[in-house]
Image (cartoon, grey):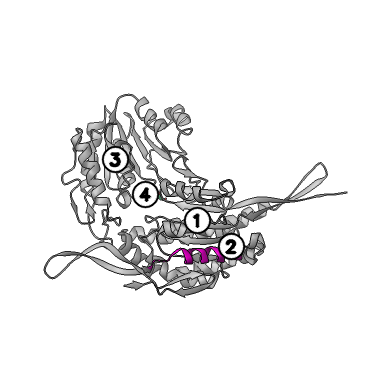
Amino acid sequence: PYIQDRYLVNGSLKKWEGKFTEIVSPIFEATPEGTLVQKSIGSIPDLGKKEALEALESAYTAYDKGRGAWATMKVEERISCVEKFAEMMLETRDEVVKLLMWEIGKPYNESCNEFDRTIEYINDTIVALKAMDRADSKVQKSDGIYAQIRRGPLGVVLCLSPYNYPLNETFCLLIPALIMGNTTIFKPARHGILLLSPLLKAFQTCFPKGVVNLIYGSGRTLATPIMKSGKVDVLALIGNSKSANILQEYHPKKNRLRLVLGLEAKNPGIVLPDSDIDLAVKECLLGALAFNGQRCTALKILFVHEDVVQEFNQKFVEELAKLTVGLPWDSDVNITPLPEPTKPAYIKELIDDALNLGAVVLNKGGGDSLKSFVNPAVLYPVNNKMRVYEEEQFGPVVPIVSFSDIQEPLDYISESNYGQQVSLFSKNASSLAPLIDSLVNQVCRVNINTKCQRGPDVFPFVGRKDSAVSTLSVHDALRTFSIRTLVAFRSN
Ligand code: G3H
């Protein structure tokens, strides 16, 4: 087990002598008697308010109202710190991948992909920053005034990352924040936390003291006093809107706070009568169930035209039956244990509610569970009385709605609290122009004949309504975590 007994504050890896929280794997193991037991894989410090404020003071002092060494350092020097960090991080690949499997049940290939994609993200950020620095620092002239335009940091960033992409989404926030000269306090999610242990040394070695502070414990205990201090300039959170709303309210000068939020979504797939059904089935299956549906970008409800719904459902269930259930290290596995202990019961509630209101589970064994495993369930016909119609399931349930008039899915999208993405399936993509034009005003990405997803990471990742605030991508995040400043002078 990983006994993580140190946390990073003010450049030192402090030893924690207080209470610890045990981390258990979602993977159950059989005892010699055949009983299934959950495996303890380590523990993390359960830090308190004192340590949270210590981390805050460390980040605040290192930033020193923009006068700190990190904020005033030349861009090239900050880049070389990040390059060194990426080099050290590469050495941890095997260990981090192993922990991604044990802690959050992510299949081996997807865990490798998350690691490699993160390294690529860091490298692409460096390239993008060099290009942006050249473009943004050119001098503009107008009416006899020359202005040198620069990009400056914002200050202290409180960063809270999610469990489903504990590495990639963490670094999509941290790296752009750091490279632009901000200082950070980082509190990871409870699941997928031990995998940061192999990186602690790299954080400590590559960044000046106080620039990265990593604390462990409950979000409420740690983030509340940090936000109440009024010393946080950016709240960068990927997770749920409830926490985001509570935390921003604590800030005494809310209008000074920049929000970078990646929140819930209920992305619909719309299968039109002229779709290539085989393609729609393949994309919707992967879109809905990759990593057991635990992605904000997952397709969370499918609207299928009544003329093709029988064919679609039959093929969907056939393809679903080919997915393999197993442990993360089994080869080509698709369905793995769920890390959130309450998730199987929640999924069962959604299924039972839909069944009571007239839906059926189309696939054999759909919804069956064993401890942390839940066999994906395809629910049909789903209607607006059922909880799964609106709630973001963030798990292995696929609700299918049959529609006769395109207005039904369009109304669903316009009335939804969320506005991230939609996927449209049709063989006549050129006829979709008016539909696309209206949808881009409702969501932030319209996918044609392809599932919803975040990547490629160079594309802007953004959402409307309760789905997101600010734009994240390799390029956009550099602007999200910085502000334009000018030095203007008269020439004569
Ligand atoms: O939970 C949201 C993640 O950003 C999903 O990313 O679509 O690239 O798998 P992805």
Is label 2 within 8 A of ligand 1 (CB to nearest ligand atom)?
no
Is label 3 within 8 A of ligand 1 (CB to nearest ligand atom)?
no
Query: Residue 310, image x and y in percent?
Result: 22, 32
Report the Cα–Cα distance between label 1 and label 2: 18 Å
Of the image marks 3 and 1, the number of the one nearer the N terminus: 1
- Label 2: which secondary element: helix
Q: Which mark is residue 173?
A: 1
Give the labeled residue for mark 3: 281
> What residue range appears in magenta?
45-63
Q: Residue placed at 43% from the left, 57% from the top?
A: 168
Indicate the amino acid at tag 2.
Tyr
- Label 4: which secondary element: loop
- Residue that extends furthest to the left in the rendered view of this protein: 33
Of the image marks 1 and 2, the number of the one nearer the N terminus: 2
Observer-nearest of 336 and 65: 65
Is label 4 within 8 A of ligand 1 (CB to nearest ligand atom)?
yes
Residue 216 in view here: yes
Quadrant in the picture for the N terminus: bottom left
Q: Residue placed at 42% from the left, 73% from the top?
A: 16
Query: How many labels were placed on the picture?
Result: 4
Q: Is residue 210 above or below residue 320?
A: below
Give the labeled residue for mark 2: 60
Report the Cα–Cα distance between label 2 and label 3: 51 Å
Of the image marks 3 and 4, the number of the one nearer the N terminus: 3
